[in-house]
Image (cartoon, rainbow, N blue to C red):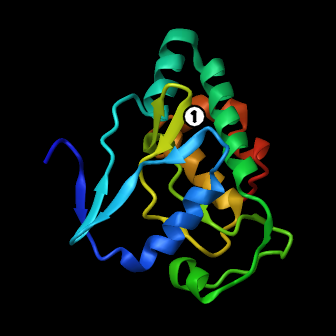
């Protein structure tokens, strides 16, 4: 199969959402892995390169934890900049995925969100970054702090690096409180 990953799926109903997520990134250094509809599923572009997570760990090993934390903060600020332009609204879709939550209307959101922009899902290809996983993309508002929380959590706490990064107050710098 020429090295191109294929996924069997019935994704036809999700194509407008995927197109909306792609449009939301136009003009930025982040793009999504090319996905083509084929009979019985989708075909994804084959990518090579290191993930952002691998890159950050390399920076930590070669330069120390502070430059690593600074690069992670840069990525978090970039993701934060993508997720704006919509007011939070509880929708049926939100309830189905996240349950019932009370959040202020001024909660920062975007009309389209990918909650899985964790560092391991970003492939660095030269100056461009490519998100390889967008099955957790939604066409309803999701608070940006939830997305930022997931990025920090999966790079630090989930990977048993939380204590190393505690002094950088990543959650606090992103406005995430308990």
In this rendering, position of residue 17 left or right of residue 25 = left
The answer to whether residue 21 is above or below residue 156 is: below
- In percent of width and height, residue 44 lies at 32, 52
Disc 1 is placed on an element classified as: helix
Which residue is rendered at x = 52% and y = 78% of the image?
97
**Residue 134, x across and y down, in percent:** 46, 58
Q: Nearer the viewer, residue 1 or 72?
A: 1
* Residue at (30% x, 77% y) in the render: 10
Q: In the image, what residue occupies the spot 62% across and 33% down?
A: 72
Front residue of 60 and 105 = 105
Quarter of the image where one finds residue 162: top right
Q: Is residue 36 above or below residue 78?
A: below
* Quarter of the figure with residue 166: top right
Q: Residue at x 63, y 85 (%)?
A: 100
Residue 116 picture location, percent across and down: 50, 55
Pointer 1: what residue?
163
Single out the residue that lies furthest toward the bottom: 92
Image quadrant in which you'd find residue 112 = bottom right
């Amino acid at each position: 199969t020429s090295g191109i990953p294929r996924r069997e799926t019935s994704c036809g109903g999700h194509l407008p959402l995927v197109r909306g997520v792609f449009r939301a990134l136009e003009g930025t250094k982040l793009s999504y892995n090319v996905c083509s509809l084929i009979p019985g599923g989708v075909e994804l572009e084959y990518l090579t390169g290191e993930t952002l997570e691998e890159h950050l760990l390399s920076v930590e090993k070669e330069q120390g934890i502070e430059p690593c934390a600074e690069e992670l903060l840069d990525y978090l600020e970039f993701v934060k900049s993508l997720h704006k332009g919509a007011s939070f609204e509880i929708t049926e879709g939100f309830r189905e995925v996240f349950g019932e939550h009370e959040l202020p209307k001024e909660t920062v959101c975007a009309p389209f969100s990918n909650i899985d922009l964790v560092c391991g899902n970003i492939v660095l290809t030269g100056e461009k970054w490519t998100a390889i996983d967008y099955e957790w993309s939604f066409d309803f508002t999701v608070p940006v702090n939830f997305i930022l929380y997931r990025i920090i959590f999966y790079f630090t706490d989930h990977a048993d690096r939380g204590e190393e990064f505690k002094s950088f107050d990543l959650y606090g710098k992103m406005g995430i409180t308990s």
